Image: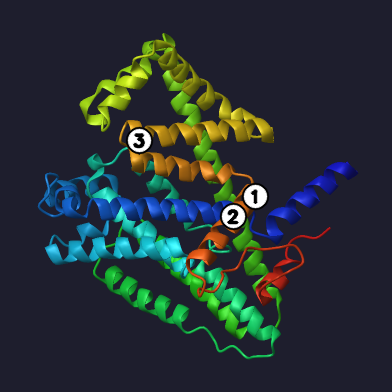
Amino acid sequence: MSRFALSVSRGLTRVTESALGPYQTAVIRIGFAATWLLFLLREYPHRQEMYGPDGPWSWDLAQQLIVGNDAFTALMWSDSQVWFEIVYGLAVLSSALLLLGWRTRTMSVLFMVGVLSLQNRSIFMGDGGDNVIHLMAIYLVFTRCGQVWSLDARRARLAWEARARGERNGPDQVGPALWGVLGLALAAVTLAGWLDSGWPAVFWGLWAVQALWWVVGRRRRTPEPRILLDVVANLVHNAALLVIMAEACLIYATAGWYKIQGSRWQDGTAVYYPLHLDSFSPWPALSDLMSANGTIVMLVTYGTVIVQVAFPFTLFNRRVKNVLLAAMMTEHAVIAVVLGLPFFSLAMIAADAVFLPTSFLRRLGGWAARARGRLFPGVGRTAPGPREGTPRTKEATEQTHVGFIA
């Protein structure tokens, strides 16, 4: 019983004292923001046909569907062309800012609004990659995904260095001003009756939490309120990270088990057929080269099923998991080139990144920093990430001792 109690105590301490996987959540933030941003930019000339008020899936049809499924989309607030351009532009802007890690708490919410608004406007335009982005955009709201590799982390480091030199930092004005403007916009939308089916509670809840965080940070007399908020935020972050990992495992498990039931996957010929579809053959010569060898087709077909079914069961064996993870990422890279599905592949690679080892991600960040230093010598470095015993901010110092310590 003493060992069990000690294990439970250590587990509680671990999930409450810090936000786990800071590098993994940063990669997810960067990966999905970049994927959605590149998609919006590539489809900019075709945005009217895909999501515009005069597209094939008309505004009236979309309105009827939204009434039935209670999905959220800001594009249903007006059928004007100007409003559509505003929403599309805000979706592009929020994706770019989330990619950079500027005000990640705010941008993650705006990123979710942009994804839901466009995808729910024309649900028949999406594919599996869009579904993954749809889900991850919601999960990212609950993570502390700006702790490393972000402008927020750089700003926190610079503030800590200034305090270490004895300099006084003025209060943050951009964050409160941004959330104040968004609060006024949310109030206007709510009073207009454009939010229903529980969405007012969702957005007002997110706004109130941020307001509470600001009030506690400015008005606190003792550290306990901030410590309590850190504990809650860490719990929510870690729970969201667990959901993201479970979602990725569920995607591969269901895909693998459904493939097993198909006769073409059973006889080892399933990969041959998409290679000969005109819609998925951007490089016909490459597709013909791959499909010409029956042994390669059979190995890729069976290998795909084996990797997808086995991956969730290998998470507790680091070496096997890393091998299968590399195989899946390579497979998605091949799909991006051979089948012409770059955004689906990018979305899946971003989801897979949650399982990448921290040591590898730290080395990757070091390589990227050195490469950027060579290309842009005058640009200041960003924070390299949290290190043991080296807190960058006052909040980081407090977080070292946050949690249920036994």
Label 1 belongs to which residue?
Answer: 358
Q: Quadrant of the C terminus?
A: bottom right
What residue sits 24% from the left and 24% below the top? 277
Q: Horizontal and vertical percent for residue 374?
A: 52, 65
Tell me the residue that label 2 is attached to: 23
The relative height of residue 209 versus residue 202 in the rendered view (above or below) is below
Q: Amino acid at mark 3?
A: Val
Q: Residue furthest left?
A: 54
Q: Secondary structure at mark 3?
A: helix
Q: Of the residues under marks 1 and 3, which one precedes in the sequence? A: 3
Mark 3 and mark 2: span between their CA atoms?
A: 27 Å
Q: Which of the 4 image quarters holds residue 381?
A: bottom right
Q: Are marks 1 and 3 in contact (CB under 8 Å)?
A: no
Q: Which residue is mark 3?
A: 337
Mark before the other along the chain sequence, 1 or 2? 2
> Residue 228, image x and y in percent?
66, 68
Q: Secondary structure at mark 1?
A: helix
